[in-house]
Amino acid sequence: MDEIDKKIIEILKENSRLSYMEIAKRINLSEASVRRRVKNLSSKGIIRRFTVDVNTGQGANAITLVSVNPTASTSEVAENLKSIKGVRIVYEITGEYDIATILSADSIAEINKCIDEIRKSNGVVNTNTIIILRVIY
């Protein structure tokens, strides 16, 4: 991945709906080159998906940090957490906690249900949840 690929990724992070032509104008490349590079980044797994981040002003979001039992596989616990309703993203991380999850639901009550499911998961020994008050773009 070179500097041009990194620029394309940064542009797509800001707005994944931009056309290849618009991206090409911003980085002074041809539309075909941008298309080829995005296709290449996708096939390598660097770009895994283009998403929609909807913020209607309703609902609740949280980050839950998870400690995994030392005898359990962190990767297996992380895979299992992905299937819980309300878990949007799962990261394996370093530091005091082993996993960070991004949660999204219609209400705090739904977030609490999601956290309860995380706590019941095999291999989970401790959690710490942070409720997101607002997102600043």
Image (spheres, grey):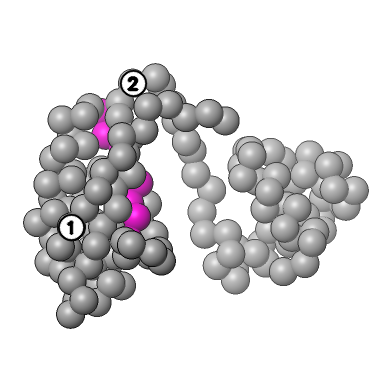
**Furthest-left residue in this view:** 120
Q: Looking at the picture, does residue 38 appear above or below residue 94?
A: above
* Magenta region: 99-106
- Comparing 63 with 5, the one in front is 63
- Comparing 3 with 50, the one in front is 3
Rendering quarter of residue 57: top left
Q: Residue under circle 1?
A: 126
Disc 1 residue type (three-letter): Asn
Counting labels gives 2
Q: Residue under circle 2?
A: 58
52 magenta-colored: no
Disc 2 residue type (three-letter): Gln
At which x and y percent is residue 40?
67, 67
Sort mark 2 into few (<14), some (14-19) or many (20+) by Cα contacts within 10 Å. Answer: few
103 magenta-colored: yes
Whichever of callouts 2 and 1 sits on the residue coming sooner in the sequence is 2
Q: Distance between the residues labelled 2 and 1?
A: 29 Å
Q: Say what secondary structure mark 2 lies in.
A: loop
Q: Say what secondary structure mark 1 lies in.
A: strand
Q: Which residue is drawn at 15% across and 68% down?
A: 123
Q: Which residue is drawn at 80% across and 59% down?
A: 4
At which x and y percent is residue 70?
21, 76
**Furthest-right residue in this view:** 28
At which x and y percent is residue 103?
31, 43
